[in-house]
Amino acid sequence: MAIFATGMELCWNRVAATQFTLYMAIANLGRATGSGFLGPLRSALSWEYVILSIAGFALAMLILVQMLRMKTHLDRIDGLEKHHLELEAARAARVPA
């Protein structure tokens, strides 16, 4: 659930449906790829090492997630929204009533 909430929070409201769909598709691609690696891992390693490898991948992903700059991304989204509102205001000012 936290992944869904984080994905929703990171979306720009004007394109949120498409952006969230892409986030979920990328997540599903990761799951499918991980499942695809299970067969080759099992044929090359014993179950103990397969489980250890999966735990290693999970640890690596946790480290990579810590490197994400969520605050910077949210600040950029706010900047995009402000810029878009300024453009709309400028267009509205040019249109005669």
Image (cartoon, helix red, strand yellow):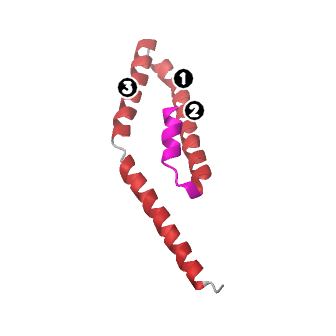
Q: Residues within 10 Å of mark 1 (few under 14, many from 20)?
A: few
Residue identified by numbered label 1: 39
Tell me the distance, in whole angstroms, between the alpha carbons under discs 3 and 2.
18 Å
Q: Main secondary structure of the magenta part?
A: helix
Q: Is residue 45 left or right of residue 20?
A: left
Q: Of residues 70 and 95, which is closer to you in this image?
A: 95
Name the spot of residue 36 as percent of width and height, x first: 55, 29
Q: Which sits earlier in the primary sequence, circle 2 or circle 1? A: 2
Give the image quarter of residue 32. top right
Name the spot of residue 64 as percent of width and height, x first: 36, 38
Badge 3 element = helix
Residue identified by numbered label 3: 56
Residue identified by numbered label 2: 32
Q: Does 9 appear above or below 47? A: below
Q: Of residues 57 and 21, which is closer to you in this image?
A: 21
Part of the protein shown in magenta: 1-14
Mark identifier at residue 31: none
